[in-house]
Image: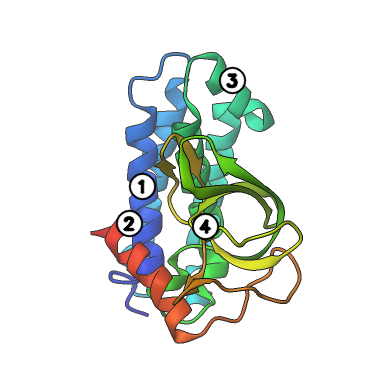
Amino acid sequence: MDTARNPKILMAERCIKDLARLLTGLKGVGRDTAKLVNAMEAKILEIKYSYGELGGLKPLLSELNSHLLEFYNALGGNQWVSKLRKIGVDNEKIAQIKFAMNIIYNLEPRLKLPDDPAYAVDIRVGEIESVMKHPNADKLKVCNVNVGKVITVVTNDLSVKPGEKVAVSLLPPANLRGVVSEGMFVGYGKGVSRKDGHVGTLPRLNEEELNSIRKEVLNYLR
């Protein structure tokens, strides 16, 4: 495996750097978090330049996730979001931290998927739970979507409805006219692609759908 150029590994490396940037200067966050970010960065570099196959990478990936668990606990455990909000961290930055941790945590499962930049992020079957008007844009909708956990997705497809199942790519969060979107509905042509399958599982995607995700991933990694 060409681990040095594998987009899934490059995405994890980018996310670790993002964590370091996001936590810099935050008062109320312990020094241990910075040390653990450094430990994760060292481990991902070891993985990146190992040129090993997945079976051989398992011990390194396990160590990476152990560092991530320590980081999660140092950040505040299951209360980390509340803790960061209390010290004034906004929703966009919290969503970015969530994204980065998720990318690192799910690196091993993604490495089992086809060698394609589209799979550098998680892609899930999601069920739309609610659809609301965007407070600042008439041509956008704000959706709560269950992908195994509930996330917010902002879409320009005004036809989406509660109860529909769609493919969702969990891309880096983006602030769209004042609402933080934690993913993108996958589609091509005229709108969002409706999908069958169990919530939280990997949907079947055609080449056009994969390409829409691929472009977003490669733009982020540049």
- Where is mark 3, residue-wise? 83
Would you call the spot at circle 2 few (<14 residues within 10 Å), some (14-19), or many (20 or more)?
some
Residue 28 position within the rendered picture, expressed as x and y whole percent measured from the top left: 48, 14
Residue 91 position within the rendered picture, expressed as x and y whole percent measured from the top left: 50, 30
Q: Earlier in the sequence, mark 1 or mark 3?
A: 1
- Where is mark 2, residue-wise? 45
Q: Amino acid at mark 3?
A: Lys
- Where is mark 4, residue-wise? 170
Image quarter hosting the C terminus: bottom left
Query: Which of the two marks, 1 or 3, is nearer to us in this view?
Result: 3
Front one among 141 and 120: 141
Query: Which of the two marks, 4 or 1, is nearer to us in this view?
Result: 4
- Where is mark 1, residue-wise? 41
Asked if marks 4 and 1 touch (Cβ < 8 Å), the reply is no
Q: CA distance from mark 4 to mark 2?
A: 24 Å
| Residue at 51% over, 62% down | 107
Q: Earlier in the sequence, mark 3 or mark 2?
A: 2
Would you call the spot at circle 4 few (<14 residues within 10 Å), some (14-19), or many (20 or more)?
many
| Residue at 41% over, 66% down | 8
